[in-house]
Image: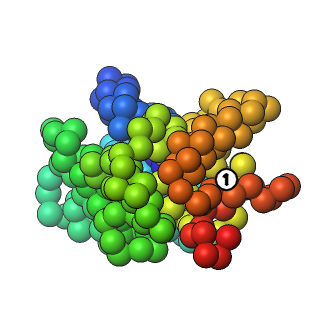
Amino acid sequence: MRLLIIEDDTKLALLLARGLREEGFAVDVTGDGEDGAFRAVEQDYDAIVLDVLLPGLDGFEVLERLRTKKKRTPVLMLTARGTVQDRVRGLNSGADDYLRKPFDFEELLARIHALLRRAAPESDVRLCVDDLVLDPRSRDVTRGGARVELTVKEFAILEYLLRHRGRVISRTELSEHVWDEHFDAMSNVVDVTVYRLREKIDRRGPGLVHTMRGAGYVLRAPEIA
C-alpha cells in the first residue's frame, strides 16, 4: 500500500514515514500544499495523511482540490487546532478521519488501517483465497494452516493481489502501490519479488499466483485457474 504524507513539520514527517515504512507501507513525503495537491491528484495513492497548516495551499484547500477532481483517496487530516469548527470543515470538505496533534503513532496507524479497510471491496478483516489467509492487522500469512514467512515487499504485493483477487494487475500498478516515488522503473525488482512470493506460497498447494504474459499478474483460486 502506498501512502502520501503532506506535512511541513520535517521532523514529524520523517518520523511518520519511517514508522509507516517499517509497517510495510511505501511512503512519499512533501511539506508543501501545492506540491501535495499535485501529487494527490496526479498519482494513485491508497491513503493520504494531510496536515491542515501548510505553506502554499492549506490542508482544506488541498482536500477540496482533490475532491473537485473526483479523487476518492481516503484522507486522514492532522491538526494542532482542535476546534469543532475545524473538524466540521475538514469533514465537510471530504476528509475521512481527523486526528489532533500530538498523537500516538499507534493510533495513527490504526486509523490508517481502518481507512484502508473501509475503502477495500471486501468487508472481512482477513483476506483469503482458497487456503491462503492474510491478516493485515497481525501481518500473519498462512497457507493450509502453516505460517508463511514473507519479506515486507512480498507481504505488500500479496496484500495488494488479494485485495484485487481475480483481476489482472500490471507490473506498473504493482510498482505504484508497493514502492515509493524512488522506484526504478527499469529494474526487474517487481518480477523478482513476485517470483520469490510465488515460490513461498505455491510450494504449499496448487498455484494461486499466475503470470499473464504481457499483462501482469493475477491471484485466483485453483478451481478457476
Give the percent coordinates (x, y) of residue 120: 43, 68
Residue at the image position 22 percent from the left and 62 percent from the top: 87
Q: How is the image coloured?
A: rainbow
- The image shows residue 37, relative to residue 163, as above or below, that is above
Looking at this view, name the residue that lies furthest to the right.
214
Q: Quadrant of residue 115?
A: bottom left
In this rendered view, identify the residue nearer to me: 159 or 133. Answer: 133
Residue 62 visible? The answer is no
Residue at the image position 34 percent from the left and 56 percent from the top: 145
Circle 1: element type? helix
In this rendered view, identify the residue nearer to me: 211 or 58. Answer: 211
Q: Quadrant of residue 188?
A: top right
Give the percent coordinates (x, y) of residue 220: 60, 67
Residue at the image position 42 percent from the left and 54 percent from the top: 143
Looking at this view, name the residue that lies furthest to the top.
11
Residue behind mark 1: 173
Residue type beneath disc 1:
Glu
Q: Quadrant of residue 74?
A: bottom left
Left or right of residue 208: residue 67: left
Please identify the quadrant where the C terminus is shown: bottom right
In this rendered view, identify the residue nearer to me: 50 or 137. Answer: 137
Give the percent coordinates (x, y) of residue 14: 37, 26
Give the percent coordinates (x, y) of residue 46: 49, 55
Residue at the image position 69 percent from the left and 58 percent from the top: 210
Left or right of residue 10: residue 86: left
